[in-house]
Image (cartoon, helix red, strand yellow):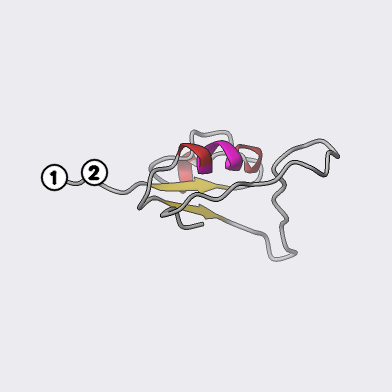
Amino acid sequence: MAARATTWYGQTGRTGTGSGSWANAAAATSLATIITGAASGDQVWVVGSTAGTTYFPTTTTTRTIAFTLKSGVSV
């Protein structure tokens, strides 16, 4: 029996774990961790604002850090 895919949620200003629903959305700074931990078939949803939101993989100014996407995981 195949494992059930998980939808992960991320939104600026949130403090949850990212699993289950928007009410438990993780902070935008956790997106790299969520993507890393996601399994093939999972989805990662992020919400932006009407003014536009840019998600960065770090809170520093280091330009060599990036999100690494995983095969089989939709963002």
Q: Amino acid at mark 2?
A: Ala
Q: CA distance from mark 1 to mark 2?
A: 7 Å
Q: Which residue is mark 2?
A: 3
Q: Which residue is mark 1?
A: 1
Q: On residue 32, which mark appears?
A: none
Place of residue 28 in the rendered image (x, y in percent of width and height, measured from the top left): 64, 43
Q: Residues within 10 Å of mark 1 (few under 14, many from 20)?
A: few
Place of residue 75 in the rendered image (x, y in percent of width and height, measured from the top left): 51, 57
Q: Secondary structure at mark 1?
A: loop
Write the start and end of the magenta stretch as one range: 31-35
**Residue reaching furthest right?**
61
Indicate whether 33 appears above or below 42.
above
39 left or right of 30?
left
Q: Secondary structure at mark 2?
A: loop
What main secondary structure does the magenta stretch of the protein show?
helix
Name the residue located 77 percent from the left edge and 37 percent from the top edge: 59
47 left or right of 19?
right
Would residue 7 be counted in the magenta stretch? no
Indicate whether 58 appears above or below 45.
above
Place of residue 61 in the rendered image (x, y in percent of width and height, measured from the top left): 86, 39
52 left or right of 69?
right
Q: Write down the quadrant of residue 46 in the picture.
A: bottom right
Indicate whether 41 appears above or below 61.
below
Place of residue 60 in the rendered image (x, y in percent of width and height, measured from the top left): 82, 36
Name the residue located 67 percent from the left edge and 60 percent from the top edge: 49
Q: In the rendered structure, are the residues bearing label 1 and label 2 in contact, judged by CB atoms less than 8 Å apart?
A: yes
Q: How many marks?
A: 2
Q: Amino acid at mark 1?
A: Met
**Residue reaching furthest bottom?**
50
